[in-house]
Image: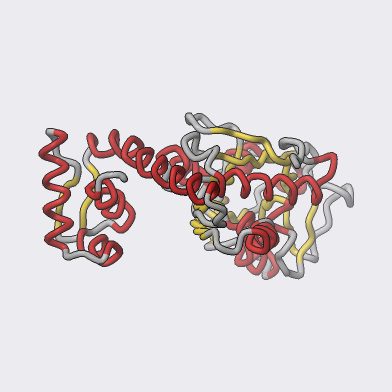
Amino acid sequence: MASFSYQVFAAVVNYGTFAQAAGALNVTPSAVSHSISQLESDLGFPLFIRSRSGAELTADGQVVLPVIQGILNLEDQLQQVADNINGLAAGRVRIGAFSSVSTNWLPPIIRAFNKKYPQVQIELVQAGFNEIVEQVRTGSVDIGFSLLPVDAPVTVEPLVQDPIFCVTPRSFTPRSGKYVDDEDIGKRNFILQQQDYDRDTKRALDRYNVSTNSINYSIDDQSILSMVESGLGMGILPQLALSKLVGDVNTYPFSEPFARTLCLLINPTQEHAPSVSRMRLEIERYLATRYGKAYMGNKVRN
């Protein structure tokens, strides 16, 4: 199977220090240091910048990261195929998702998947849109959820259009009574979650001439609703995020509708691994049932 030094390399990248990587691999820190030094000697260039705070990839290390991760993923895929041939329900799926997908979609998807394949290990990483794209590209996660457009060499499947709404205090009523327009928004303050401040939200802010000085940030979507409820400003949130939030607020569409396109990303090396392909199918089944004709993804396969 794959060289142990590749596993050590990936562990140091994931954990950020030799000591933590050693703990995860159940070896000594000196064994990790020796393995990395040997790999650097074999490759002919340093992979990490070592410091008291940890280990950071060099520019050359960044280049070889997806290659080494790809080797490890292929080994994992080979093991899954062997387990499948041997009739074992085994394997692993690593999923990267942003907060509203983690809250709304993944619990029923994972529950249905676990019922069918209880021995398959599922690892969930929550991150921002761009970070998820990078994680799928390098192979540190197998499947990710992000927003279109995606400029990376990964498999991309559009899923659904997610409308974007203006969230206002309960006391606020727009002129039309149905949507907010330029005059309603005026010079009002807006509260956003910085991590999920995506390009589609920015398009709405730019369209209604909201200045950067009028934008404040909150830690999460629920906090945004609480601040809007208290009259500290307005919010901009997509439908998916709003579906599980609670607050004494109003939601209105904009006079010019805005939406973001949610998509599924899959690492090409892992795309045909048995556990990954089964998880993809479970995701497609769930979304096809939930969204019906609005679902943009692949037709559900038997």
**Residue 172: image location, x then y, percent:** 79, 60
Q: Is residue 197 in view?
A: no
Q: Is residue 259 in view?
A: yes
Residue visible at 63% across and 54% down? 101
Q: Quadrant of residue 251?
A: bottom right
The colour style of the image is secondary structure
Q: Nearer the viewer, residue 142 or 86?
A: 86
Q: Is residue 82 above or below residue 272?
A: below
Q: Nearer the viewer, residue 234 or 289?
A: 289
Q: Is residue 27 above or below residue 202?
A: below
Q: Nearer the viewer, residue 211 or 109?
A: 109
Left or right position of 55 against 128: left
Left or right position of 151 against 59: right
**Residue 74: image location, x then y, percent:** 41, 40
Residue visible at 58% across and 32% down? 149
Left or right position of 270 against 67: right
**Residue 197: image location, x then y, percent:** 56, 48
The C terminus appears in which quarter of the rendering? top right
The N terminus appears in which quarter of the rendering? top left
Residue visible at 36% across and 37% down? 66
Left or right position of 285 against 37: right
Q: Is residue 39 above or below residue 104?
A: above
Residue visible at 71% across and 45% down? 284
Q: Nearer the viewer, residue 133 or 177?
A: 133
**Residue 43: image location, x then y, percent:** 16, 34
Tell me how many marks there are. 0
Q: Residue furthest right?
A: 177
